[in-house]
Amino acid sequence: MENNSKTRYSDAELQEFKDLILEKLRVAKEELGSLTQSLSNPNMNGTDDTAGTYKTLEDGSATLEKEQTNQLAARQKKFIENLESAIVRIENKTYGICRETGKLIQKERLRAVPHATLSMEAKMKQG
């Protein structure tokens, strides 16, 4: 049986993914930074000088906004963790290998979701 499918990505390919992930990490951390900043300075939007009549309205929407920002920040943290573990997998040379099938995850998928640990095939089975 001829087996021409690779079992792992080459070091050059891994380096290419690493660059991609490091760039995504940089952006993600910046976004998290600005989310965190807007959470710690709720009055940055200049709403504090609004007339009292709008105050109660403001409070309601500010609370909602804060919850949404919190959720975004939490999601961003998770994304950063996922990207960081992808970097670890690159260093272990296990990056891009589906944890279900043991086959290589398609490059297109990894470019779109660089922290993916399942191939589309395995993901479809789950769904």
Image (cartoon, helix red, strand yellow):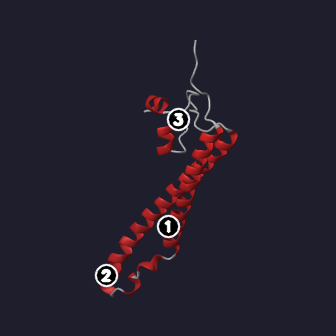
Circles 1 and 3: CB atoms closer than 8 Å: no
Q: Amino acid at mark 1?
A: Leu
Q: Amino acid at mark 2?
A: Tyr
- Estimate the spatial distance between the alpha carbons at disc 3 and disc 2, rounded to whole Å: 49 Å
- Residue drawn where x is 59% and y is 54% of the image: 22
Q: Nearer the viewer, mark 2 or mark 1?
A: 1
Give the mark nearest the N terminus, 3 or 2: 2
Q: Relative to 120, is 27 above or below?
A: below
The residue pinned by badge 2 equals 54
The residue pinned by badge 1 equals 35
Front residue of this view, candidates 115 and 77? 115
Give the mark nearest the N terminus, 2 or 1: 1
Outermost top residue: 1
Circles 2 and 1: CB atoms closer than 8 Å: no
Q: Nearer the viewer, mark 3 or mark 2?
A: 3
- The spot of residue 115 in percent (x, y) is 55, 44
Horizontal side of residue 9 vs 73, given as left or right: right
